Image: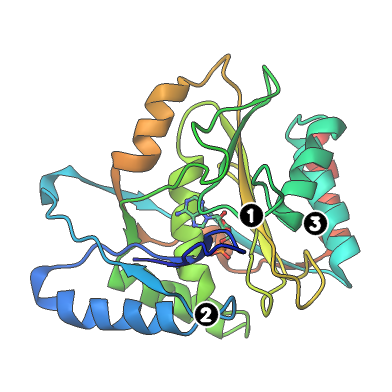
Amino acid sequence: MRASKQSTETTIAEHISGAERLVTTELLQSCLSNLLERALNHSLGNPDLINFSINKIDTNKIEKRKSLPIRTVKVEDHREGISLVEKILKHLGINQYIINLAINWIQFGGAPNGGNMRGAILFDIATMQRLEENQYSGIRATNMDMSVEAELQLKKLLYSKNIYNSRIRDALTLATKVCNFSGVIAELCCSDDPDYIGGYVANKNLGYIRINKLKPFGQHTGGRVIFVDSTCCDVNSYKDYLRNSIISITSIHEATKEEVLTFNEMRKILVGKHE
Ligand code: AMP
């Protein structure tokens, strides 16, 4: 599903929301109804165009994956959240110049005109170049979902700590797909929803690190940056993987159990991994 506001003489087209589902034919109707409700109730406003695209897929092509491990870090405010993002990305070998660029993009929108994008920025840390064909739309990861069983497992795990929210299902699914490819360093995300100020950094080894505050409340911009290293990532295959491979998250990583952390606890984990 994709919902947007069309351009007018005085405004430019604006992406509002999008979502992906892998369902059997029997569940199609209820799934469409849920996605329609989602499209019509987004805090970025009412769409004037909603697209549904339904593709039959060969179930033999579905690749099953375990989710990334989940860590939740509760920070004092968005400044502390951004400081943690810097520490994690630095730990992963990304230089400060690139970190600053990325933080600016995810806080204020990565389109050339400064607005929100529909997809992610794909950034090559080896050449310092953006690799999307179109920098207004970015690259969208598609063809992924979480199974009913995995979603139940996720809810059970996070409800008990009072840290479940409905966004985590899709975000964890996307982050798990994005990070499971050779030469991908990390994914950074800040929601563009003005009512939701959280985001995450994801990496195959460190996991999906949710940070509860990454921007001030009420801000209408956000974005995603995927960092790759083209010296060890086949970028064209990766773009094809993001768009076309069919990934289902069928279980949640067990290391999730005890992980609700403060800024300092997460910082110590990063320091410990250096030693
Ligand atoms: P959200 O977390 O849904 O608020 O999305 C935040 C930003 O992530 C959006 O503004 C898009 O730039 C980007 N984004 C959302 N969905 C996708 C996707 N499926 N693939 C790549 N980027 C996405």
Residue that mark 2 sits on: 42
Find residue 44 and report its image quarter. bottom right
Q: Which residue is mark 3?
A: 266
Residue that mark 1 sits on: 223
Residue 170: percent from the left, percent from the top?
Answer: 45, 65
Name which residue lies at 62% across and 40% down.
186
The answer to whether one can see residue 85 in this image is yes
Check contact, mark 1 vs mark 3: CB within 8 A: no
Mark 1 or 3, which is nearer the eye? 1
Of label 3 and label 2, which has the lower sequence position? 2
Q: Does the numbered disc 1 mark a residue whose Cβ is under 8 Å from ligand 1?
A: yes
Compared across the picture, whether 222 is left or right of 35 comes to: right
The coloring applied to the image is rainbow
Residue at the (69%, 63%) spot, across then down:
221
Q: Are marks 1 and 2 in contact (CB under 8 Å)?
A: no
Sequence order check: which comes first, mark 1 or mark 3? 1
